[in-house]
Amino acid sequence: MAQLGSALDASPSPDIEPDPNFWFDDRSVVLVAQRTAYRVHRSLLARASPVFHDLFTIAHPDTHAFPSGQPVVHVSGSAHDVKGFLHTLYDWRKDLSALASHPAWLADGHPNVPFPVLSALMRLGHKYQIPDMVDDAVRYLEAYLTTDFRTWMTAVHVLSDCMVVDIFETVNLARLTRKPAILPLALYLCCLRPIDAISNGIKRQNGEVVRLSAEHTLRCLRARESLMLEWCQLPSTLRRTQCASQCANKELCAPSLEVLFRCAVHTLAQTARPTVFLNRLQLGRLLRHPALLSLCSLCKQSLFDMIEEQQGKTWERLLEILGLSTTDLDIKWTGYTPL
């Protein structure tokens, strides 16, 4: 990376704060986003983005704000996003392209490229006409927001509060960038949020509110009722589960299955919205119940097989529930097949 200006020698006016991580000493061009300035390399940005190339042709020095006389370009968008965009251009572009071919998700469900970075890359890559950047980010997201049932079932799905905001934004970006494969599960995860969040949006830490479009808001609100009915299938699925034929301890396993059924009924009675039913790792209280530990391995597997079969049926209906179709999205939706 080029050398940074050691003393921010062309310090901008008091209204604007230079970013020390992107204030280089070769005095090429200054970008200003909100109240943050970045002195970066004109040739790098112009080569990467035709939008920046055109902006630079009309950029003029602002000797009042920047006495050193570099051309100044004011860009829309948050300073946080612009910094992430520059970080990618300077440091991550090559690495992200390589990682996107083999996405890795940590045990807690987070990508090793943070969700906020991926959503920012999609948005800014689209805005500044850098399709490779959008494609790399989408390939990462497709490893999580998959169209394959088995891939989804073997992953861990934990959404932190900051990731929920980015899921909302991902729904909007899927249409904006014409990347429909990530839309169904992004919408599904939005459906699991409270009605107020779906209707009014979710606030970021910086105060910005991310909202779904009117179309997607209505789609999610309509889908919640059907998803709740799918979630209601859990108790009946447990009721149908019998001890495995080769179970050697039916005196213990049969009562444990009954306890788990009652637990599911109790959980359902306390549930105000659909939960993450489409993954057995997220069945919450049921999987933490001591009765599950009392089951022999055969009965436990039989229970999981029954639950997975029901989840597979939900998966196969999910596009219809969301008001989508493979024809409209031009995607392949891979359904449930028993192992």
Image: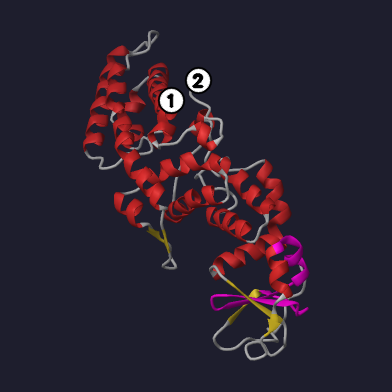
Q: Which residues are magenta?
A: 22-50
Q: Residue furthest top?
A: 245
Residue type at numbered disc 2: Thr
Residue nearest the observer in this picture, 34 or 309? 34
Q: Is residue 279 visible?
A: no
Residue 301 point in image, percent of width and height: 42, 20
Question: Which residue is the site of mark 1?
Answer: 312
Residue 87 point in image, percent of width and height: 66, 63
For marks 1 and 2, the one nearer the N-term is: 1
Residue nearest the observer in this picture, 217 or 141? 217
Quadrant where the N terminus is found in the figure: bottom right
Residue nearest the observer in this picture, 1 or 201? 201
Disc 2 secondary structure class: loop
Residue 309 point in image, percent of width and height: 41, 21
Left or right: 177 with respect to 292? Answer: right
Q: Is residue 52 magenta?
A: no
Question: Which residue is the site of mark 2?
Answer: 337
- Are the residues at dot 1 and dot 2 in contact (C-beta closer than 8 Å)? yes
